[in-house]
Amino acid sequence: MLSKLVLKNTFLFLVLLIFSCGNSIKKEEEKDSMSIKKETILNEIKTGADNWKVYLPILKTYKNIGVVANQSSLVDLNLEKEQKHYPSSSKTIHLVDWLIENKINVSSIFAPEHGFRGTADAGELIKNGKDTKTNLPIISLYGNNKKPKPEQLKNIDIIIFDLQDVGARFYTYISSLHYVMEACAENNIPLIVLDRPNPNGGIIDGPILEPEFKSFVGMHEIPVLHGMTIGEYAKMINGEKWLKNNIQCDLRVIPCLHYNKNIPYNLPVKPSPNLPNTQAINLYASLCFFEGTNVSVGRGTDKQFQIYGSPYLPKSSFNFTPKPNEGAKDPLYNGKTCYGEDLTKIEKINQLELKWLIKAYNQTPDKSKFFNSFFTKLAGTKKLQQQIESGQSEAEIKKTWEKDINSFKKMRASYLIYEN
């Protein structure tokens, strides 16, 4: 009887011990979880624009400031609690408004493709004008005036550049960066680039642009996905002496804080009208090749760069009908039913995908009408079209890029600011 009682008490003791240990472990786990959350909050990513304690003192030493900006040029007010005079409901403020609030004398705004407010179609002529809020003059850097003219820079002492790039060669903000750097170098004007994370991280993939195919949708001998932030890219333009006559710009990059390229980064606003969300930005480099074919990438829908299709592809359960909307006043196949594929739900991709392009080509009955002349500009080479037409597989095509990509990676390494 006594031995049974001892056994029972021993069992109860062990249960209480395990329960106590379990609670202790749970408390430690909760403590660790709280620490992680606290660390995450403390180390919240700051863009170059948010890193204003570095660049505002510099700008205050100059009289007249030019700003290259669009709707993505935002400063996050929540990161700086001492800005008490802003309403608690405010989360961001436009860079231009932020500079004016801080007594910086902004004299001119330069607007890239899609305009200062970011509502114009791809390729649409952007006219000079005035910002209705600040009454500042807006100078277009698209159309016939891709590079600031000396007379447009006459009274400017320094330029600050803040555009959100997406890490793809044919996204024209890096071409605008090139021309702004060149104009600054020629006119002895310092340039500050406010860096922003690359939403496609450090992905490097695609054919290297060949010199004879340079255009505004591809100015430099780099792969389609370059795996750099716009600040790192500015350093590479300068360091490799890609500006005209090998001149170099008086450049300073204001870095992001608490950022590396392995951290997923979702943009707070769409960088252009037809990149409405994270999925579109991730698929952009792969689907943009369709812009050089007879296949729609969903312009004129609410799923731009997340779907593809045309009236010439086989009829299927998935179809869409493009109609005019913001950023696509006259979309390809306006009012016509397009058949293709819906990619809105697929997993994030970490490379340049050719499978959709190859599939659409193979399914198009009249292949002679599939490609147009713009495809070569986007690819930066004639080889890609020839490879697809000859029936090469995606793996075979990618094999031909390896040597050039490895050379690019070596060159790129010396300009990196953040860990890959």
Image (tube, rainbow, N blue to C red):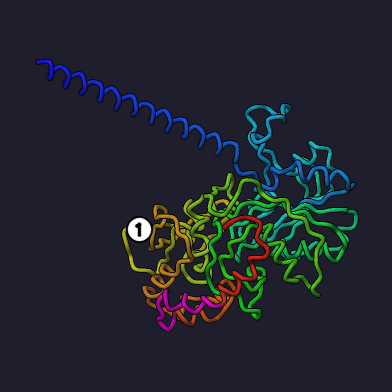
Say which of 372 and 356 sits in front: 356
Amino acid bearing label 1: Phe
Say which of 389 and 268 sits in front: 268
Q: Main secondary structure of the magenta part?
A: helix
Up the image or down, 63 lies above or below 299; here it is above
Q: What SS does tag 1 mark?
A: loop
Q: Residue 184: give x, y in percent of width and height.
A: 82, 61
Residue placed at 80% from the left, 67% from the top? 248
Residue placed at 47% from the left, 75% from the top? 398
Classify residue 314 as left or right of residue 213: left
Confirm whether the magenta stretch covers residue 279: no
Say which of 227 and 335 sits in front: 227
**Residue 329, can we see it?**
no
Q: Which residue is mark 1?
A: 318
Classify residue 85 as left or right of residue 268: right
Confirm whether the magenta stretch covers residue 397: yes
Q: How many marks?
A: 1
Query: What is the magenta range?
Result: 389-403
